[in-house]
Image: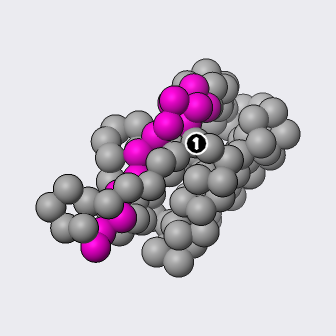
Amino acid sequence: MENLCKIKEVFRKIQQFEQKLNNELNVTINEAMVLCSLYEARKCSGDISTDTGISPSRASRVLLSLEQKGYIIRSLGDKDKRKMMFELSAEGEKKKLEISDMEFKLDFNE
């Protein structure tokens, strides 16, 4: 039961962080995870889905949202022109750094 209680606390902290992301930076937690994933390298949607744990259909919606916000750039794959690739725009790189600067504590004694 103790592990379940700790999981509940982790979940609560993540929810608080997500609310902070929304209020201060106007991004969802899924958008933040995708930005962090793309900060590492240019990727296709399947790799982003695997990397973040977001379902492929949800990842598609998140990618569209980030593209509309101007944080990512969509392009054709180098070898396979049928594959769509995604990378951070200059604005996306700035937003990822803003996210990285946000404080996220998992202090269970609060």
Q: From the top left corner, tell me how far across and down residue 59 is, in percent.
A: 52, 67
Q: Quadrant of the C terminus?
A: top right
- Residue at the location (41% across, 45% down)? 87
Image quarter of residue 47: bottom left
Residue at the right extreme, as displayed? 23
Tell me, yes or no, if residue 101 can be seen here: yes
Circle 1 — which element?
loop
Residue at the top extreme, as displayed? 101
- Residue at the location (68% across, 37% down)? 108
Q: From the top left corner, tell me how far across and down residue 9 is, in percent.
A: 69, 50
Q: From the top left corner, tell me how far across and down residue 46 is, in percent.
A: 35, 68
The stretch in magenta equals: 82-95
**Left or right of 89, for residue 85:** left
Q: Is residue 41 magenta?
A: no
Report the residue marked by disc 1: 71
Q: Quadrant of the N terminus?
A: bottom right
Q: Nearer the viewer, residue 22 or 104?
A: 22
Image quarter of residue 83: bottom left
Residue at the bottom extreme, as displayed? 57
